[in-house]
Image (spheres, helix red, strand yellow):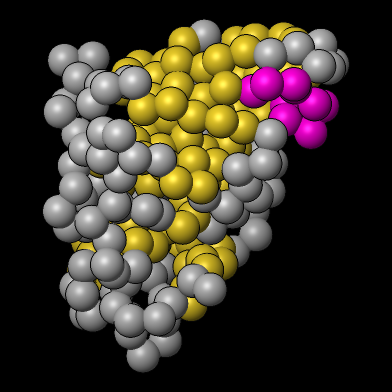
Amino acid sequence: NAGVTQTPKFQVLKTGQSMTLQCAQDMNHNSMYWYRQDPGMGLRLIYYSASEGTTDKGEVPNGYNVSRLNKREFSLRLESAAPSQTSVYFCASHLAGGPNEQFFGPGTRLTVL
Amino acid sequence: GDSVTQMEGPVTLSEEAFLTINCTYTATGYPSLFWYVQYPGEGLQLLLKATKADDKGSNKGFEATYRKETTSFHLEKGSVQVSDSAVYFCALSSPPSNTGKLIFGQGTTLQVKP
């Protein structure tokens, strides 16, 4: 089992460019999440998907869109990247039904110039 | 809204020293509490958790006790090793939590020197 995988690992964009961050999990988890990690601010939730076919905004959704393609995959799209979106992005998944742990991917380091 | 506050870092200790990282929370209801660890260049992984008052979570020599009266979940280890150098995050999940949403503290960097 690979757990939670993310692609790419690193990306550099110019302001205004678009890109999609990919995430997949092979644990048959119901819920999936996208976070961003910035120095001194911990992890902040961008969007989440409680189950296949549903998505909801988190704490910092502006400038992002998501797609829950199927139970395994949850992608994050930046339509017009801004320097303020320079961050490390983590995808996570969770087996619904209680205080179970979230499993995290290795992260994508994104720089927007 | 719910929130988690951790002590400021970085925390620098010598090997075999005693570690405490403070964590306090604000939540309505009765949250579950977690400590996650992030090693350099990696994603977060669960270190320990506690789901009700007075529960003690423990793993790899780390411990934390859910204290409802002080709304705290401090992380402790009796003797740290260089390999414990990492960023530690305290987090909570408030009911109803079938989505598993977590609220994280800002993280505390621990550096252990030989």
Reply above or below: B25 against B98.
below
Seen at 49% across and 61% down, the residue is B21
Q: Is residue B17 left or right of residue A54?
A: right
Q: Is residue A82 visible?
A: yes
Q: Is residue B10 visible?
A: no
Q: Position of residue A39 (x, y in %)?
A: 69, 41
Instruction: Give the percent coordinates (x, y) of residue A57.
Output: 51, 47
Give B85 or A110, whichever is nearer the viewer.
A110
- For the view shown, which residue lies furthest in the front direction? A53
* Image x and y of residue B18, in percent: 43, 59
Residue A61 location (% of width, % of height): 60, 43
The quadrant in which residue A106 appears is top left
Q: Is residue A80 magenta?
A: yes
Q: Is residue B105 above or below residue A39?
A: below
Location of residue B8 with respect to A53 vertically, above or below: below
Q: Which residue is nearer to you in this view: A68 or A21?
A: A68
Q: Quadrant of residue A75?
A: top left
Q: Is residue A113 magenta?
A: no
Q: What residue is drawn where x is 34% and y is 62%?
A: B93
Figure disc tally: 0
Range shown magenta: A78-86
> Left or right: A110 with respect to B91?
right
B43 or A79: nearer the eye?
A: A79
Residue at x 21% of width, y 67% of height: B51
A90 sits left or right of B73 in the view: right
Q: Residue at x 34, y 68 (%)?
A: B94
